[in-house]
Amino acid sequence: MSQDKMTHSKFTPFSSQTDSYAIPERFTFPYYYAPHPLASLAIAELQDFLGNQQTWHHDFTKQGKMFAVLVVKNQQGELGYLSSFTGTLADSEDSLDQAPDFFVDAIFDKQAHHKLFSHQESEIESLKSRISQLESSPSFIALTEKLSVSTVQSEQEISAFQQSIAVAKKERKQRRAQAESLADSSSTEKLAALIAELGNQSSREKRDLKQLKQQWQQTIADLTQQHNEYTHHIDLHKNQLNKLLKKIDIDTLKATQFINQSGVIKSLFELFKQSVPEQAQTPIPYSSEQNLPKLLQTAFRFDYTPIALGEFWWGSSPYEQVRQHKNLYPVCQSKCFEILEHMLTGINLDESPLEQTPSYGKELDIVYEDDVMVVVNKPAEFLSVSGKFIADSVHARIQARYPSATGPLIVHRLDMSTSGLLVLTLTPETNKQVQKQFIERTVEKRYTALLEGNIDNDTGIITLPLYGDMEDRPRQMVCHHKGRSAETSYQVIARANNKTKVYLYPKTGRTHQLRVHCSHQAGLNTPIVGDDLYGFKADRLHLHAGYLKLRHPVTNIEMEFEVDAEF
């Protein structure tokens, strides 16, 4: 994209000739794809613009962003593309004003929203101010403090009185015992009088305790009633505020509207509303400002025909997530599925690679088997356990090979893209025994991985806690607050052609642990070759579980298994 071609139109004609490119028969399957050559060409032009432009002042080395292109055909039959970035670029006031005009507009118009809800927003601010005044009122603070102090004081006084009663009771018991031991026939009346006096003392103490409790009970009740009347007044304002906030949320969902190819418009409220209110979903924040919904919205608004999609990351990676500069990415299904189900209605999509069977024709090598245990060498791109769309898996084949096997079979799993050693058991007892070894981390595991670049150190330990990215599954992210501890040791075994082969020794077994620990900037900062989630696509993920050592679940004999990687 040359800067002299920048216009106020959202449609950008190709700078390069496109006559030799065949138009795809179907639109890109958004959640897993290889970009069509036309999309790749549009991506290259947009990246060229981003790398050379000087009018847009945003530091992508500090904060990267996801960009996308949508190849379209306009009403005149000309090929071109629309450009987009997710959300806003920064919190600074001028970040969007400086964005070039050819980027598509946001679906949710904040200025229109402000005008539409300005009355409610001023009422909300007024309620917030009133609540703050009531809660910070000197009389309310004093009343709250008095109630708290009185409650503590009542407990202390009653406890002290109860202790004094206990001491007095003990003394009376001693006096009575002493009097009884010294009493004779001539002092019977004196003993009876003493016992009566001691009894009266006990009764007086019980009455006094009861009276003390009643006094404090009344004091606390009076203070509590005053406090409740005040808090009830505050709660009325808070309830009114919550109703207004909820109404604005619903109105915002209703105001965020999406159009499809047929001109049918649906709002976020309609797309996520369910018949059972208790099960109603809530869209993930900023779902409407993801790239493909914005691009399709513009295309349908100008009556353009969508041809192909391409999405890529530009700039530095955020710390929590792993993003590679210039790398291609699929649309986030977690954020966009319901929206795109509507917007892509009537558009023929490429077949979903996620529903195809990549294991067709692949052999499952049996490394070891006996009456209670099986060890297999799982091929890459082969499921450990059958999925929603793919039935073929290690579990399914072992089940077919051992139809009389009992128990859950599976002890541990490997990612579909990872090859290597997998242990299965044929009885519940042996499954429990082997599983215990994995849980107690007595099983020794070693993986072989080929990394995209060179790393400096020959050995080391990576300890980055991992947490599932709830907004972009199945990705994992590094989170030092909520993440689960994860530890990986590594050892370099070869360096060649700007790539590094390493042994990886995971102490823990978190999802995608090795892939994130290798690719993350605080880990090895070098993704595994072929890692389509945290690195770059290739013929396969170059990660292989090549070595296992464990004890046989019946004989308790230590067993070692090793299978070399194919890379």
Image: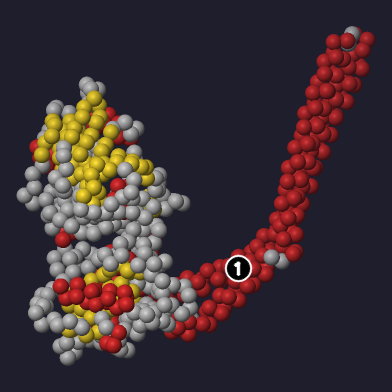
Name the spot of residue 494 as percent of width and height, x first: 23, 44
Q: Image height check: is 96 above or below 392?
A: below
Which amino acid is tagged 1? Answer: Leu
Q: Image height check: is 279 above or below 111?
A: above
From the viewer's side, name the closer residue of 301 and 56: 56
Q: Quadrant of residue 561?
A: top left
Q: Which residue is mark 1?
A: 236
Residue 110, visible in the rendered structure = yes
Q: Is residue 134 left or right of residue 30?
A: right
Which residue is located at x 10 percent, y 39 percent? 365
Residue 470, visible in the rendered structure = no
Q: Quadrant of residue 374?
A: top left
Element at badge 1?
helix
Colour scheme shown? secondary structure
Q: Is residue 277 left or right of residue 298?
A: right
Which quadrant of the rendered structure holds the N terminus? bottom left
Which residue is located at x 31 percent, y 65 percent? 325
Name the spot of residue 459 as percent of width and height, x first: 33, 41
Q: Is residue 474 left or right of residue 15?
A: right
Which residue is located at x 19 percent, y 72 percent? 40
Q: Residues within 10 Å of mark 1 (few under 14, many from 20)?
A: few
